[in-house]
Amino acid sequence: MNLNSKSRVVLLAAVGLVNGFNGLRAQIQAQIPAQDARNSIVPNTDTHFTMPVYRSLAEWESRKAHLRKQILAAAGLLPMPVKTPLHPVIFGRLEREGYSIESVYLESLPGYYVCGNLYRPLGPSSKHPGVLLTQGHWTYGRLENSPNASAPTLGASMALQGYVAFSYDMTGYNDMVQTPHAFGEPREQLWSFGPLGLQLWNSIRALDFLESLADVDAAKIAMTGASGGGSQTFLLTAIDERVRYSAPVNMVSAYMQGGDFCENAPGLRFDTSNVEIAAMMAPRPMLLVSASGDWTSHVPAEEFPAIRKIYELYGQAGAVENAHVVAPHNYNKESRAAVYRFFGKHVLGRSGYSYDEKEIEIERLQDMLVFHGRPLPQGALSYDQVFEKWKEVGTGAAAGVDDRNLLRETLKYTLGAEWPDDVKTTIDGQRILLSRPLRKDRIPGLWLPGGPQIALVVDPRGAETARQSALVQDLIKRGRSVLMIDSFQTGAAVAPSDKSHRFFLTFNRSDDASRVQDVLTALAFAASRSPGGVELYGRDEASIWCLFAAAVAPINLSLHADTGWFRGTDQDYLHYFFVPGIARAGGVSGAEWLASQKEGRVR
């Protein structure tokens, strides 16, 4: 075929346009991952996490506020329960050279007792700094006395230096026999009832007790603990700024996030790690103690510099320090000496301070235990009763919320959900792919463009099943543009996913929570094309996904979802909508109330 010059120019231009379109299409498709990252990237306790870089204080403060609420939600403390009277009982005073020891029990919940020992300096009555001493998983907990860790030596030494120290048990250790140390089956998870949440609440109440003492200066309270006690330390300091100084020992690590139930709760580490949580202490003074022989061996080179960068945002780089000990996992004499120096400098205000431990008389266990040879107080709760009390307290906190924004926020954090700022799409005929580029997820679906009003239809069997429904045919006849999606692990989105990691839900959303997120992502896409509002249709089990998506979505929409079959019992959640913490966060009744506030009708 012969072409004149003008025809060749037109042809070349057309080819250029086609090539340009294909190149653009390839570029857009490259933004949609070939696999959903929620299946292919599964973080766990032993994942090597990298601390994000924050370039401004405002950026970090926003992130810190988000993480605080995430921790509280995971612990079952969002919104915060009402604090009931502690009714502390202090007895059995032992006086030694320069200090005294007393036994203590107090009610963190009515009928549930936190137990420990109070170490006080002897001498003239005056205000003293206070220090909370939390425990690791040593055999004897707060009474462990070995070269590797001696809690009584730490408590007595603190008192000899002028502190009032409260050393208290972990759940299931020593005197705290009302619950075991490890618990939290799926039904309990619905209510965020587990060791981490209960211990965090106990630590809040232990802090209330310590600052209430007449001989304690509430403006000078410190906290320290090793291993699991280190986890308790940075968790409390992350959510309660009354702790002004801290020293988490041999626990802050980018390589291991804690291997026990009391260090893991569903939702705790969605998109974060202990390094970032520990950095929430900034700009308050903090000492990171690390060891050569455990998972904190990289702290001097990796975790400490990363956390110091957060302190630099406040202009307080000197407020965080690292002491690295050549030893196995411990809270040994050398580690304790580093803590004494740091607290002496910052709490006591003594530059160049050091303290050499004196030989401490180790008391008999029966003299230190609270309930040795004594019954629990009258009215003390059994394990099942503690669970019911936790549910009662949580239900009361959620029911007391009459602020739509607060309830929406609680549900959002519990679901680990977000309203995406950016939704990438590819459209190939009627096929559509949606993705949040930062999350690298992948949501297949069908897109049938029509009129300006968009209807999103979600079927638990997937988009192809939805297309065959009478509902979709009717929407098409009514001139709607119809979007149908394969929500997570439904329809074309079914894919292998490794959930075998221990504490999987600490780091990863449940399938049902991910489905709610997919509905939100699809709503964001639809809302960007239909500013007048979106119709949302949930079919069968997907009606619950759509209800919770409508509850947290920041847009007006018309929800059409028959949820009458879902009664909101624990069994309903376990079988049809398993999201840890969802019952504690207000559940289906809270979601219905929020969804009913939308301008569109809920049907």
Image: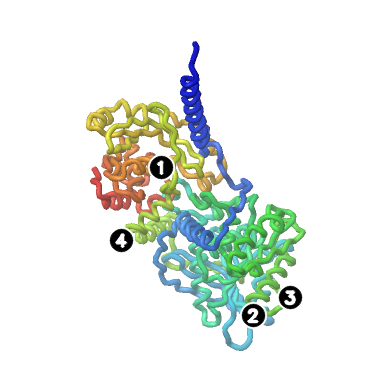
Q: Is mark 3 on a helix, strand or loop?
A: loop
The amino acid type found where label 2 is placed reads Gly
Number of residues whose C-alpha sits closer than 10 Å to that of mark 3, classed few (under 14), some (14–19) or many (20 or more): some
Please tell me whether residue 590 is drawn above or below residue 321 in the rendered image. Answer: above
First in sequence: mark 1 or mark 3? 3
Q: What is the C-alpha distance between the residues marked 3 and 2?
A: 13 Å
Q: What is the C-alpha distance between the residues marked 4 and 3?
A: 53 Å
Q: What element carries label 2?
A: loop
The amino acid type found where label 4 is placed reads Asp
Please tell me whether residue 496 is drawn above or below residue 109 in the rendered image. Answer: above
Q: Mark 2 points at which residue?
A: 162
Please tell me whether residue 44 is drawn above or below residue 289 in the rendered image. Answer: above
Quadrant location of the C terminus in the rendered image: top left
Question: Where does residue 60 sit, x and y in percent of width and height?
Answer: 53, 60
| Total labels drawn | 4
First in sequence: mark 2 or mark 1? 2
Give the farthest residue toward the bottom.
124
Q: Nearer the viewer, mark 3 or mark 2?
A: 3
First in sequence: mark 1 or mark 4? 4
Q: Name the residue under label 3.
A: 354
The amino acid type found where label 3 is placed reads Ser
Question: Where does residue 132 sit, x and y in percent of width and height?
Answer: 58, 70
Q: Mark 4 points at which residue?
A: 402
The amino acid type found where label 1 is placed reads Thr
First in sequence: mark 3 or mark 2? 2
